[in-house]
Image (cartoon, rainbow, N blue to C red):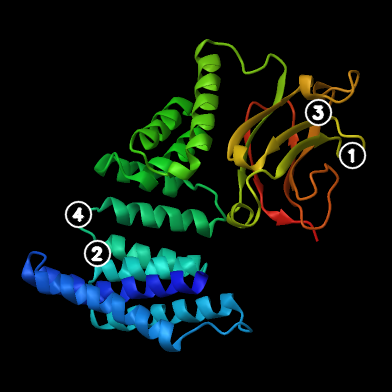
Amino acid sequence: MMIWLVLLVLCLLALAFVVIPLYRNSGFFRPKLGLFIALIFSSSFFLYALIGQPISNLDENSIINSDFTEVIDSISEHLADNPEDIEGWLMLGRSQQMLQKYDDAVSSFERALDLDDERNSQVLVALSIALMEQKDGDITERSSRLLEEALAIDPNNVDALFYGGGAAARRGDLLLAADRWEILLETNSLNEIHEFLRKKINEWRGLAMNVNAGSKISSQTVINLNISLSNEVISLLPIDTTVYIIARDPSNPTPPVAVIRRQLIDFPSLVNLSDKDSMIPNRKLSDFSQIEVIARASISGEPIAKPGDWSGSMVIKTNSDQTFDLIINKITP
């Protein structure tokens, strides 16, 4: 099935290089141009079905990588002769993203941005996402600024609303985050994650109400965490994977001081550990000056680390009002 999707992408990329110049020259969509498009698609699929059946003993990933490498080479040749082609640089960057060549993708999108005098929102968002991928999913200050600029140009840009909502939540602007994701629901975009969007919107609005009312999220909150997932975790693990947030004494890790249980679909998210999460009544988080926090996505569903689990950890001081960023990005060997 994947090879057919690759074929479709390759056809679309090849078609763009032919159709865009024709369209620009004609100024409108002529019937002959429509016929030409239909012929390209029909002949491509016919020839593939006739002579290009996938070989079962080949590794599908190597076939896909080879195909996209050829695409990158072709676009690079085109850009060597047409270095001012913004669409070409965008295509190159997106193809490099498919091969997880994020440094190269950032360079390509930077080039497109330099050429874009009109500050197209699509270029700004593409660069912002590539910068996040380059940092293993972390929303950098520049990524956030690019998203804000894109939304100022196009308030209904779906990608900018999605990632801009996440960026706002990370900054602590929960109402803005909820507003942006509600716009996504209203535009009927990203239908496959509507349930997740609604859940996070309700969570953010609930937290914001507590803050605006002048009350803390919990009178005994000790640790505030902003927990996120790496791109690998998002792509490899099911959304119902159990995630444990474990607080323990660095010098005496067993038993844990406090534990919270969530699911992968709940993240990225703000998480608050407090004395109410303590496992033993007379052993509270507030009794410790520093604590080690581990966020673990458990393949087995058990809190004990096993090979194949993904986690992130850090040691922090419990008397800090800071919100600590914790990324689940390391696999247990």
Q: Quadrant of residue 320?
A: top right
Q: Amino acid at mark 2?
A: Leu
**Residue that mark 1 sits on:** 253
Q: Which residue is mark 4?
A: 118
Residue bearing mark 3? 289
* C-alpha span from label 3 to label 2: 52 Å
Residue visible at 84% across and 53% down in the picture: 306
Give the tally of numbered discs: 4
Local crowd at mark 1 within 10 Å, few (<14), some, or many (≥20)? few
Residue that protrudes farthest toward the bottom in the picture: 51
User: What residue lies at 49% left-to-right and 28% top-to-bottom?
Assistant: 201
- Packing grade of label 4 (10 A; few <14, some 14-19, many >=20) is few
The answer to whether 314 is drawn above or below residue 126 in the figure is: above
Q: Amino acid at mark 3?
A: Ser
Label 2, label 1: how far apart the Cα atoms are: 54 Å
| Residue type highlighted by circle 1 | Pro
Q: Position of residue 199 (x, y in %)?
A: 54, 30
Please state if 152 lies on the left or on the right of 105 as rendered.
Answer: left
Q: Is residue 76 visible?
A: no
Instruction: For marks 3 and 4, give the one nearer the viewer.
Output: 4
